[in-house]
Image: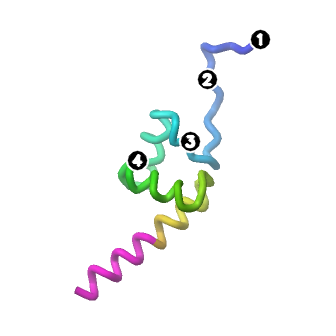
Amino acid sequence: MDNLTKRAQPDRSKINMHEAFEVKYWTHALGVSKEQLQRAVDKVGNSAAAVRKELAVTSARDDEARSST
């Protein structure tokens, strides 16, 4: 029988956008808004590594756009 008083350690290799505590963790850990995190997850899936990579690419693209104006 499951013990509902003990929560299992979250899988930090995946991002679960349906759990508020995980969204809060990942937005803080990655330094992004919930909307930015959702867009990245929608684009590349819920793999934390893929989302990190996507956010780095997006950030670099945004930086380049800012410096060219």
Residue neighbourhood size for the residue with mark 4, other residues' Cα within 10 Å, grouped as few (<14), some (14–19), many (≥20): few
Q: Which residue is mark 2?
A: 7
Q: Amino acid at mark 1?
A: Met
Picture residue at 51% right of the left edge, 34% below the top: 19
In front of the other: label 4 or label 3?
A: 3
Query: Magenta residues, as a range?
Result: 58-69
Measured in 3D between alpha carbons, the distance from the residue under mark 4 to the one under mark 3, in whole angstroms, is: 14 Å
Measured in 3D between alpha carbons, the distance from the residue under mark 4 to the one under mark 2, in whole angstroms, is: 21 Å
Residue 50 position, x and y percent, is 60, 62
Q: Secondary structure at mark 2?
A: loop
Residue neighbourhood size for the residue with mark 2, other residues' Cα within 10 Å, grouped as few (<14), some (14–19), many (≥20): few
The answer to the question of whether label 3 and label 1 lie on touching residues, with beta carbons closer than 8 A, is no
Measured in 3D between alpha carbons, the distance from the residue under mark 1 to the one under mark 2, in whole angstroms, is: 14 Å
Picture residue at 56% right of the left edge, 41% below the top: 16
Quadrant in the picture for the C terminus? bottom left
Measured in 3D between alpha carbons, the distance from the residue under mark 2 to the one under mark 3, in whole angstroms, is: 15 Å
Mark carried by residue 28 = 4
Q: Which residue is mark 1?
A: 1
Tag 2 or tag 1, which sits nearer the N-term?
1
Picture residue at 72% right of the left edge, 15% below the top: 2
Tag 1 or tag 3, which sits nearer the N-term?
1
